[in-house]
Image (spheres, rainbow, N blue to C red):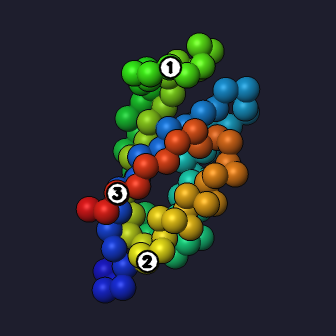
Amino acid sequence: MNPTKRNYRATFILDNRGKEDTIDQIIEGVKKDIVAVQGDVTAVENIGKKDFVRVTDKKFSGAAYVHVNFSAPAEGPAQLKERLRLNHSVYRTFVVSV
């Protein structure tokens, strides 16, 4: 591992309503975005579909959750969130340092 990189665990809530993309195709796109911010994906875990505890939209009561472990520079998570902000297939992004 490069000493200038840190380890992160990101949780993504994916939304593929009305889209042709499968969850696996969306995950591949997210992995490409991680590589674009100089990150290295180490593990991907598809948790599956879960219902939301607090539903903000009655037509969208649950979605697919995915955990991705990766290493990236310190500014990587902020750059990743900015890249994914425009991606409407990613509903929410949570990144924590591990």
Q: Which amino acid does label 2 sit on?
A: Pro
Element class at badge 3: strand
**Which quadrant: the N terminus?**
bottom left
Three-letter code for the amino acid on which mark 3 is drawn: Val
Q: Distance between the residues labelled 3 and 2?
A: 13 Å
Camera-nearest residue between 37 and 35: 37
- Residue type at mark 1? Val
Would you name the residue on which mark 1 appears? Answer: 55
Q: Residue at x 39, y 21 (%)?
A: 53
Q: Is residue 61 left or right of residue 69?
A: right
Secondary structure beneath dot 2 equals loop
Please tell me whether residue 9 is drawn above or below residue 1 in the rendered image: above
Measuring from the top left, give residue 16's x and y in whole percent: 64, 32
Pointer 2 residue: 73
* Count of marks placed on residues: 3
Query: In what element is the residue under mark 1?
Result: loop
Residue drawn where x is 50% and y is 38% of the image: 13
